[in-house]
Amino acid sequence: MSSTLEDAGKSTKFERVDVKAVNSKEERSLYQARIKIFPKRVAGTFRSLKWWVMIITLGIYYITPWIRWDRGPHAPDQAVLVDMANARFYFFFIEIWPQELIFVAGLLIMAGVGLFLITSSIGRAWCGYTCPQTVWVDLFLVVERWLEGDRNARIKLDKGPWNFDKFRKRILKHGIWLLIAMATGGAWIFYFADAPTLARDFFTFQAHPVAYTTVGILTATTYVFAGFMREQVCTYMCPWPRIQAAMLDEHSLVVTYNDWRGEPRSRHQKKNQPEDNPFGDCVDCNQCVAVCPMGIDIRDGQQLECITCALCIDACDGVMEKVGKPRGLISYSTLDTYNEAKQGNAQPTSWQSFIRPRTFLYFGVWGLIGLIILYGLLVRDRLDLNVLHDRNPLFVQLSDGSIRNGYTIKVLNMITQPRDFILRTEGLEGASMTMPGSNLGPSDQVAISVDANTLKKVKIFVKVNGENISGSSMEFRFVVEDVNKTESISTETVFRSAN
Amino acid sequence: MTQIEKDELSGTDTTGHVWDGIKELNSPLPRWWLWTFYITVIWAAGYCIAYPAIPLITDSTKGFLGYSSRAEVVEELKLADDAKKSFLEQIEKLPLAEIRKNSDLLEFAVAGGRSAYLVNCVQCHGSGAAGSKGYPNLNDDEWLWGGSLDDIFLTIRHGIRFEQDEDTRLSDMPAFGTDEILDKNQINDVAEYTLSLSNNETDGEAAKRGAPIYEENCVSCHAEGGVGNRELGAPPLNNAITLYGNSKEEIVETIANARNSVMPAWGQRLDLETIKKLTLYVHSLGGGEQETAALNAN
């Protein structure tokens, strides 16, 4: 590098970094092995935002299983619990039974449409801020920087010989990474069992092998994904960047290098600029490349690899301040704003760009599903009745001329208190019921007690007098009602006979 | 002749193979792939040593871990047996009525009875225990020899008209026609009479003529008014259920030739616990009678 190229950097206080954007199109051939990236530390608005997002998301992830929620003596007191063994899902005041999984499906659809909404309005914010891959890579980088120092120190250590110091630092780094990875897998299992009990069992080696296997697998994936694979996960493994390409349009916020302002970039001082082609604001310090965790150069324009973490914005703003130029050479901007600016009509992106048919549609669908779920949750029954008519035999002729049908009845008490119910038939003349195993004689109603939060299966025989038989198949209803008359539900079924 | 050269564009060696002027690059396998392959090879070698793997002429190598899938099954079966043990002991020990009072024990017994039923009884009584012509329906409330737990147990254990068992349930309806006890007209009349007991007669005059014949020949077993007698396995004739059909022709045939069907004594083939379980299963089908009810009926 000639000294004339260096003079701009010397006279001001910013550092010019010797870095290549290893994952830019020009630098990376198809069969090339991965080149390690050593992202430089940066401070600024978006970095601070990312710290907060990291604290909040990790906080939610680690703390949630430990929140208690009193549901009385008949149900677990963990606020969020996926109880696989008993096939129940608890979320604070909501309890979901397997047949209500449609609510969970609805939530997943909302999450999907929500991603569309976010992506079409503020771009790949999910990727840049909240995706677990991003968050854990950030966390691993914190450890890496703390032990090995910032970019230059890390490069030096990486290239240096294996001496005691390097060995010590590396062992420590990988040890802490593994601990974090284990804590990640460790937190995951607490969502599936009572957290305090499982924690005690886990550390005394009495937990179920599934728990150890799960922790093992998640430890391995976290350690490998966040420690070694990093940006490759986003570029090669994740389908979302590809899908997002279809979500983004000219009104979506993306991290943009405002080349109309920056180009031609120059390392010379202003006084040296040619008169016919004045320099742009970009001083070609390469800070934006040095901080990029994806190893690209944002100045090449929008590209698949960019997760819009906005760290290059922070880096560039810092330099712009030092050289006394306005911030925002690299900024969040829509393609529309950028094109306008290129025409000479520079304006910041307004919030109005978020309001357009596309986002309306996404928001509408998202909101509608949300309302349907909410409505469904508010009106859903906490009592259910399934009736299964015996098929073999379909009916039984009794000696007094009456006909008997057998039914398997399932009463689902979906609240966390035991309840007593009365079962009766409706719309079947001359019917009486018996329950095998009970010594009660035939009667027109049967009492059934169901434990809290469980299903009870009973066998019921219904007998109809011969003179009341009016066809080979008579429709009627079973009705089950809470003894306190708070809730009742009925199910249609048939009574079969020969004639 | 193969000539390995360096490809200028990619900087990779060629394999020296040329097809139609196209040269093949010697691109090595991805390293992760190769290493995974090596690891599987090592794994396979280790597996062959640790587990049964190599077939020999009459046997196979055992592997130093001593693993055997058969031993594993035996172990699992033993665990399952252990789990059932307390139930089985109780079923063996307790009287039937006591078992029936314990709902857990009853559920276990009924489930076991159902399995035994599906192996031993379905051939005649049908998979739904609904029987067929000549084979009683076990779901209904009519019992030839009684529907209490003890009666059902006795029937299953010793069978009906099963000569090899001394304690078998025994009775013999005469073949009124074949043995020439009654003539054709008398059989016709008494058939009409028995039909009239369940209000199904086709000829009232004949039924009236049949009444004295019934008094003379049938009442000793089927009792006054055709209520039947379980001591003798004589079915009631005054209700809606008939074992061999309710038509005039079928009843005439029954009276003329008699029906003395046989049920094997299962006590010779099944252990008592299984018979107890079968009893509880049959009793649970819907027609099972209480002990007191059974006494009254007799």
Image (spheres, grey):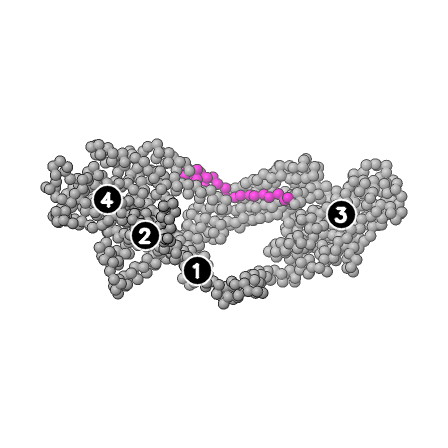
2 and 3 marks in contact (CB < 8 Å): no
Real-space CA distance between mark 1 and mark 2, rounded to the nearest whole angstrom: 32 Å
Which residue bears the numbered disc 2? B5
> Which of pointers 3 and 1 lies earlier in the amino acid sequence?
1
Which residue bears the numbered disc 3? B134
Give me the residue at 32% from left, 55% from top. Answer: A227
For this rendering, which residue is in front, B286 or A431? B286
**Label of residue A313 in the image:** 4
Residue type, numbered disc 4 = Ile
Nearer mark to the viewer, of 2 and 4: 2
For this rendering, which residue is in front, A24 or A443? A24
Vertical position of residue A191 compared to residue A431: above or below: below
Real-space CA distance between mark 1 and mark 4, rounded to the nearest whole angstrom: 50 Å
Where is residue B192 drawn, in percent x and y? 83, 40
Q: Do labels 1 and 4 share a chain?
A: no
1 and 4 marks in contact (CB < 8 Å): no
Give me the residue at 33% from left, 49% from top. Answer: A31
Q: Give the range drawn in magenta.
A: A370-391
